Image (cartoon, rainbow, N blue to C red):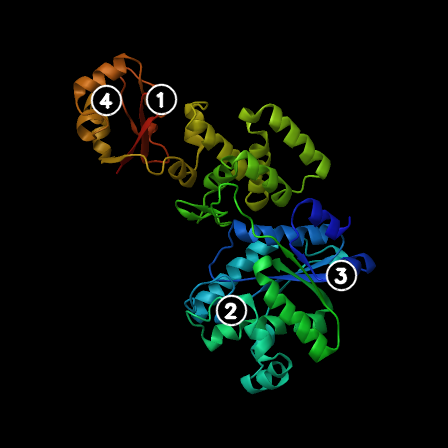
Amino acid sequence: MNFAEELKWRGMIQDVMPGTEEQFQKEITSAYIGFDPTADSLHIGSLVQIMILVHLQRCGHKPFALVGGATGMVGDPSGKSKERNLLDEKTLNHNLNAVQKQLEQFLDFDCGANSAEVVNNYDWFKDLNFLDFIRDVGKHISINYMMAKDSVKSRLETGMSFTEFSYQLVQGYDFYWLWKNKNCKVQLGGSDQWGNIVTGTELIRRKGGGQAFAITTPLIEKADGGKFGKTESGNIWLDKAKTSPYKFYQFWLNSSDEDSKNYIKIFTLKTQQEIEKLITEHGETPHLRILQKAIADEVTTRVHSVEDLKMAIKASSILFGKSTAEDLKSLDEGTFLSVFEGVPQFEMKKEDLSSGILDVLAEKTQVFASKGEARRMIQSNAVSINQEKITEDFQLTENNLLNGKYILAQKGKKNYFLIIVG
């Protein structure tokens, strides 16, 4: 496959340095993307760049994923309105290890000439002293050149430390080092990285007398103007401890029709023909959410697992009344709590399980305001415990506890209550 053409039809190219497409057509080419270890997990914004590396390798080229052990100590000012807090070494190393493990699940590290590699720029910066750096690197890039970058110009009024000002030199040296030591000829990244990337190609030209290339991807914008990857509860992370597979799956499932037409090109490996067919089918029956389901299924499987996908689908069906009590019992605790996050919660003692169901629902908890109300609703066949309709003589036991400590009460179709039994 032709790498540049693959990115073009997927809408994943913003800027291309002259000669870049020809370089990829000429030979197996090594290219890299840098990942910032500001947290101990990447989020779905980073997934765009991960997919670029996946496409790169599928097209026969060699991907390098750079984790910024050195640049993470400085902080990238690109797109930032103020200085970021610098991480301490322990936190940074923890983040680096976590991010590296995530990157390793997407790429093939044992496939011959184009096997992926993860590199850490701390490895080449740790022995480079300050005087050597400003003498051997700084002299090649003028202050005027650095001041002209958007990441600098946008901060001139509010202020910028020398630490952040120097970031483009540090990232530029990354490219130079990889070009010299790993024959890496292309840097890839988001469009906000263009200035930093170009500094690298200039350093390669001026210091090394060589030629290097670049491609950037557009920053994803939602059709409604909202920020991609952000929800009311924050970022959508790739780490299931930060964002459960259920919530991850739901993010894609809830995307708009317009956004889904873009997401399916960017985040899946489906062919152009497959995607066009899905878009047509979706247009004919939009209520079936064919596009959203196709994206959610593939991305959840790639980021998590087939088992996590099955669990997420099962969990998603619960709120729409299309599940069984057995489905509910099969959910692990994390998924169960994700599904019912935000519903009213009550606590009761385990010994109170032997109380009558009316006592439990109206006195031990406040699911109902009174026993009378609870009785009327039960007689109307409108009360469920763990997805099963109950009668007045229903008796709770420890066998009813989900994950050993939860009971799910429901009145009507949409009113859920979580009872935590301790």
| Residue 296 showing in the rendered view | no
Q: Indicate which label's residue lies in the foreground, 3 or 4.
A: 3
Q: Which residue is mark 3?
A: 29
243 w.r.t. 323: above or below: below
Where, by quadrant of the figure, is residue 180 drawn?
Answer: bottom right
- Cα gap from disc 3 to disc 4, whole angstroms: 69 Å
Q: Is residue 220 left or right of residue 372?
A: right
Query: Which of the two discs, 1 and 2, sits closer to the camera?
Result: 2
Spatial CA span between label 4 and label 2: 67 Å
* Amino acid type for the residue under numbered disc 1: Lys
Task: Kindly identify the residue that appears in the image at 63 percent across and 66 percent down.
Answer: 197
Image coordinates for residue 159, horizontal then vertical, percent: 43, 72
Residue in the foreground of this view, choosing between 374 and 86: 86
Q: Are marks 4 and 1 in contact (CB under 8 Å)?
A: no
**Residue on which the image places disc 2:** 153
Across and down, in percent, residue 201 comes to 68, 70
- Distance Cα–Cα, label 4 vs label 1: 19 Å
Q: Secondary structure at mark 4?
A: helix
Quick check: 115 left or right of 262?
right
Please state the horizontal and vertical placement of residue 419, each as a whole percent of the image: 28, 33
State the SS at label 2.
helix
State whether residue 414 is above or below residue 141.
Answer: above
- Which residue does the numbered mark 1 point to in the structure image? 413
Residue at x 71% of width, y 73% of height? 181
Q: Earlier in the sequence, mark 4 or mark 2?
A: 2
**Secondary-structure class at tag 1:** loop
Look at mark 4 in the image and give the residue it sits on.
Answer: 357
Tell me the number on the disc at residue 221.
Answer: none
Q: Amino acid at mark 4?
A: Ile
